[in-house]
Image: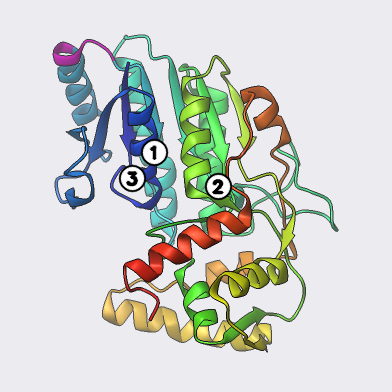
Amino acid sequence: MNIIITGATGFIGKFLVDYALEQDLNVFAAVRKTSDRSSLSNKKVDFLELDLTSIDNLKTTFDNFIDKHGSIDYVIHNAGITKTTHTPDYDLVNCTYTINLIKALESSQQPIKKFSLVSSLAASSPGIGDQMIQIDQKGDPVSAYGWSKKKAEEYIEQKCSLPYVILRPPPVFGPGDKDMFPVFDLMNKNLELYVGGKLQLLSFIYVKDLARGIVTATTSSIENKKYFLSDNGQYDNEKFNALIKECLNKKTLKIKLPLFVVYVVAFFSEIYTRISGNLSQLNIEKIKELKCSNWMCDSRDFYKDMAIEPKYKLYEGIQETIDWYRNEHWLK
């Protein structure tokens, strides 16, 4: 079976490639012409250049692919952006490019077994009280990023003719992750930071469990459904930090920043980003998500339907991540 994975050179994408190879799939890593392919250079993958900005170019690419390889069996669309200095780019990359990809695949007139969208918990509305967020919960996303993912989901659910599955992971961590690394780094320096001073209910998933779940759903007989995909645990920010400290064997000074201070930091961070071109982890859009008190989602339906269980407990994933950071000298 041939599987195309977009965003294959990114943090999550590399683990998707690894697990797909373990399942004896013929993996085609979809990349841009400018993508750094070094992280996949020693793996048994073929590269497929996709121009997501053009439906016509995508059609040509897929026609040539089918002529050469016979079929496109599965597609995992993992490419997207989580931060930008230009807000309209969220919709362009996360929604419009997704639609372009689907339209091009539909035009190939070749039966595709499954199209999987890697969406985000941010496409949901926050939880109410201390209740876990349900996949059919009504409400709107709080951020432009969340809206861009929700719009892509809605197009798939309403207009896509391909068999599909939509997966919404919560925050993902693991070896090579840069987005959550500052949390680990700060605690390694004996500091523990909280925003707004209140407890935040959270879900997480270790990247290897996420990759396994996405590939399993893609190759399963389940179609036209949407799921949260977490490790099925229930946590809060204090518990997550406590596990990191335990694995690091560190004591920390707890610092609670008022929300207005974080807004000021984010404001200047965005100015710095525009000047330097280096995207910051903290921006005004991110604060919209950080100030919500409940991002804890219910993934039980996913594990029931797929007949699997997470392999990693949160502690085990954190320890493996820290070991990687240390081996790569990210943590000093």
Q: Let me know if residue 176 is in the magenta part.
A: no
Residue 1 position, x and y percent, is 32, 15
11 horizontally vs 309: left or right: left
Residue 103: which quarter of the image? top left
- Residue holding disc 3: 14
118 shown above or below 174: above
Left or right of 198, for residue 223: left
Quote the CA–CA distance across marks 1 and 3: 5 Å
Amino acid type at circle 1 is: Leu
Pointer 1 and pointer 3: residues touching (CB < 8 Å)?
Answer: yes
On screen, 203 above or below 71? below
Residue 54 in view: no
Q: Is residue 205 left or right of residue 202?
A: left
User: Which quadrant of the structure image shows residue 323?
Assistant: bottom left
Real-space Cα separation, disc 2 to disc 1, in angstroms: 16 Å
Q: Residue at x 31, y 67 (%)?
A: 328
Give the x, y percent position of residue 331: 40, 76
Structural crowding at the residue carrying mark 1, measured as other residues with C-alpha within 10 Å and reported as few (<14), some (14–19) or many (≥20): many
Question: What residue is disc 2 on?
Answer: 120
Mark 2, Cα crowd under 10 Å, few <14 / some 14-19 / many 20+, is: many
Specify whether 114 is left or right of 249.
Answer: left
Cα distance, mark 3 to mark 2?
Answer: 18 Å
Magenta range is: 67-71
Q: 317 and 102: which one is in front?
A: 317
**At 48% from the left edge and 58% from the top edge, which residue is drawn?**
320
| Camera-side mark, 3 or 2 | 3
Name the kind of residue labelled 3 in the image: Lys
Q: Earlier in the sequence, mark 2 or mark 1?
A: 1
Residue 136: x and y, percent? 73, 36
Residue 116 position, x and y percent, is: 46, 29
Q: Which residue is mark 1?
A: 16
